[in-house]
Image (spheres, rainbow, N blue to C red):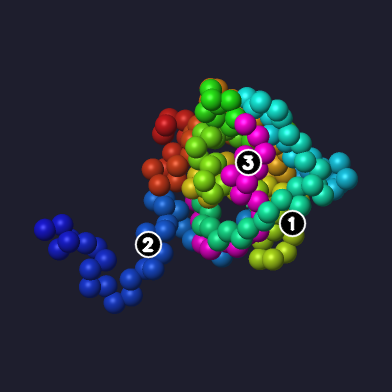
Amino acid sequence: MASFFNPGFGRKHPNQYADRLPPGQYETHDFPVLTAGPTPRIPIESWTFSLTGLVDTPVTWTWDQFQALPQQEFTVDIHCVTKWSKFDTRWHGISVETLLEHIIIKPEARYVMAYSHGGYTTNLPLDDLRQGKAFIGMGVDGEPLAAEHGGPARLVVPKLYFWKSAKWIQGLRFMAHDQPGFWEQAGYSMYGNPWTEQRYRSDD
Ligand SMILES: Nc1nc2c(c(=O)[nH]1)N[C@H]1C(S)=C(S)[C@@H](COP(=O)(O)O)O[C@H]1N2
Ligand SMILES: [Mo]
């Protein structure tokens, strides 16, 4: 019965993106810049990336060491809580799963605080970073990542609202309990699922 009422049935020009646009979002072809505060400029010589917190032995990479890790390409849709979505953004970078091969995470770790050069933080469940669901992006469309978009490197977690994708990433800190990051302390959702419109804490 339900198929009789499928709104896509019989359409002459079905929207090929209908199933890719979360509720309340619109598609943009721009790449807007959204930053709270100034753009940090991180000299490559002093750039580091660390895995810390509930791990057996923390690890820190310099830029050169980080570049030597296996890189991949990722084509993903991104969804900003200010309601723009951008389809098929093309990135290169390092899967978080690849980074996790270098540490042993303590069993009590369930959450991660992503922290950035410049002081930004955002919290995520560990599971949402695993198995290729998140990566450290170092370039878009074959070019190095522009500073305003988080270059030299940012976290990208496509399945969550884009504020979870910390620009100028400095590290991931493993935690037993969920703790609010920068926007989460200001009243945004602890999780940020665009498909259920978890924009604010009251939506959790
Ligand atoms: N370090 C840092 N990361 C950040 C932010 C920020 O202010 N600082 N803003 C977040 C928000 S709200 C969004 S929508 C995206 C915007 O990324 P863009 O500027 O590349 O579009 O970055 C996220 N990551
Ligand atoms: Mo945002």
Q: Which stretch is magenta?
A: 82-104
- Give percent across and percent down for residue 12: 29, 77
First in sequence, mark 3 or 2: give its number.
2
State whether residue 20 is above or below residue 177: below
Kindly identify the amino acid type of the residue bearing the numbered disc 3.
Glu
State whether residue 17 is above or below residue 13: above
* Quarter of the figure with residue 139: bottom right
Residue 146 is marked as: 1
First in sequence, mark 2 or 1: give its number.
2
> Which residue is denoted by mark 2 in the rendering?
18
- Give percent across and percent down for residue 154: 68, 47
Looking at the image, is mark 3 or mark 2 nearer the viewer? Answer: 3
6 sits to left or right of 90 = left
State whether residue 37 is above or below residue 72: above
Residue 82 is marked as: none
Point 44% across, 39% down: residue: 198
- Which residue is at the front of the view, 134 or 31? 134
First in sequence, mark 3 or 1: give its number.
3
Q: Is mark 3 within 8 Å of ligand 1?
A: no
Point 60% across, 30% down: residue: 105
Kindly identify the amino acid type of the residue bearing the numbered disc 2.
Ala
Q: CA distance from mark 2 to mark 1?
A: 30 Å
- Give percent across and percent down for residue 142: 69, 66
Residue 101 is marked as: 3
Q: Secondary structure at mark 1?
A: loop
Q: Does the magenta run of residues contain 19? A: no
State whether residue 8 is above or below residue 106: below
Q: Does the magenta run of residues contain 99? A: yes
141 sits to left or right of 25 = right
